Structure formats: structure tokens, C-alpha cells
Amino acid sequence: MSVRRVRLTVLLLALGVAAPSAAGAQAPAPAGKTLYQRMGGYDVLAKIVDTFLPKLGAVDPRVPNMISGLAQTSRLRNRQLIVDQICNLTGGPCVYIGRTMEQAHQGLQITDDLWQKSQKAMAETLDANNIREPEKSEFLAVIEKLKGDIIQKKDASQK
């Protein structure tokens, strides 16, 4: 199993799975509930991930190549890391134990175009799972905070 493939699968978290500090603390809603609670908790977030990952694989022909060759157990582990990270980032009780987003996506050459396609797929996934405003926008904003560590950074020779 290649390190590169594992890295992308973690991206397919949602695009990834970031360290909790990368997204900052989530402010509770006026009613005192976290985004995690307002979205419906763990089972709803797991369903969102399970709906999103196949969608993400279809947004661009480059994505399946990033994860080909992974054993089913590796795919399941990555899926669990994604669920745990989203749970954590939305104020839930989960602990994310994966790598930072920058480490997980290094060398995958994820572009802004691919990021935008994945965000669109996530918005469609939220709609399909009956996540409405304001939770939908808040969730997408949490994921958007991961962008800086997921998008391939150009080095000085690429400028």
C-alpha cells in the first residue's frame, strides 16, 4: 500500500481530515448546542461521510487513481478517521488521531479546481442528508478551513 494512496484517502474525508487545532474551536450555537449536536450527532455525520466518499470519487478522474490499490481494511480505516475528524471539528466527543492535513495530502497535487469540485460534492451530500441552514453553511465553513493544508503548495521552482 502506497503512502500516497493512504494520504488521499484521508483527503477523501471530507476532504480530508485535519488536526483539531487547524479548524479552531467551534463556537456553540445560541441555544448552546454544538454543530455536531445540531446536525444530529455521530450517526448522521457517519452517513454524510458514507454518502460523500463515493461522490468524491466521481468528481474528477484523478481522484480514483489517488486511492487505487488500497485494501478494503485501509479504506475502512480512512473512513473512520474522516468520521472522527469531522465529529471532532464540529464539537463532538470524538478524538482525531490521524496525521495533519498537510502531511496527509503532501505530494497528491490537489488543486484549487479539485477542491472546489469536492466542496460542491459535499454541499450536495449535505442536501441529500437533509442538512439545512445554518448548519449546512457552518459545516462547509469548517471544512473550508482545511483548504490551506490540503491544496498543493507550489514551491519556488513552480512560480
Image (cartoon, rainbow, N blue to C red):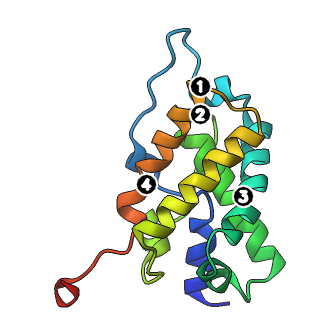
Q: Residue at x 65, y 49 (%)?
A: 84
Viewport quadrant of the N terminus:
bottom right
Say which label, 4 or 1, has the lower sequence index. 1
**Distance from Cα at disc 4 to Cα at disc 1:** 21 Å
Residue 30 in the image: above or below residue 157: above
Circle 3 — which element? Answer: helix
User: Residue 45 in the image: x percent, y percent?
Assistant: 72, 42
Q: Residue at x 74, y 76 (%)?
A: 74
Q: Is residue 91 left or right of residue 84?
A: left
Q: Residue at x 62, y 60 (%)?
A: 13
User: Is there CB contact under 8 Å for labels 3 and 2?
Assistant: no
Residue 148 in the image: above or below residue 86: below
Nearer to us of marks 4 and 2 is 2
User: Is there CB contact under 8 Å for labels 1 and 2?
Assistant: yes
User: Is there CB contact under 8 Å for labels 4 and 1?
Assistant: no
User: Residue 64 in the image: x percent, y percent?
Assistant: 68, 80
**Distance from Cα at disc 3 to Cα at disc 1:** 26 Å
Say which label, 4 or 3, has the lower sequence index. 3
Circle 1 — which element? Answer: loop
Place residue 109 in its image quadrant: bottom left
Pick the front one: 97 or 67: 67
Q: Which residue is mark 1?
A: 133
Q: Is residue 70 left or right of residue 132?
A: right
Place residue 73 in its image quadrant: bottom right
Say which label, 3 or 2, has the lower sequence index. 3
Q: Which residue is mark 2?
A: 136
Circle 2 packing at 10 Å, graded few (<14), some (14-19), many (20+), is some
Q: Which residue is mark 3?
A: 80
Circle 1 packing at 10 Å, graded few (<14), some (14-19), many (20+), is few
Say which label, 4 or 2, has the lower sequence index. 2
User: Residue 151 in the image: x percent, y percent?
Assistant: 40, 68
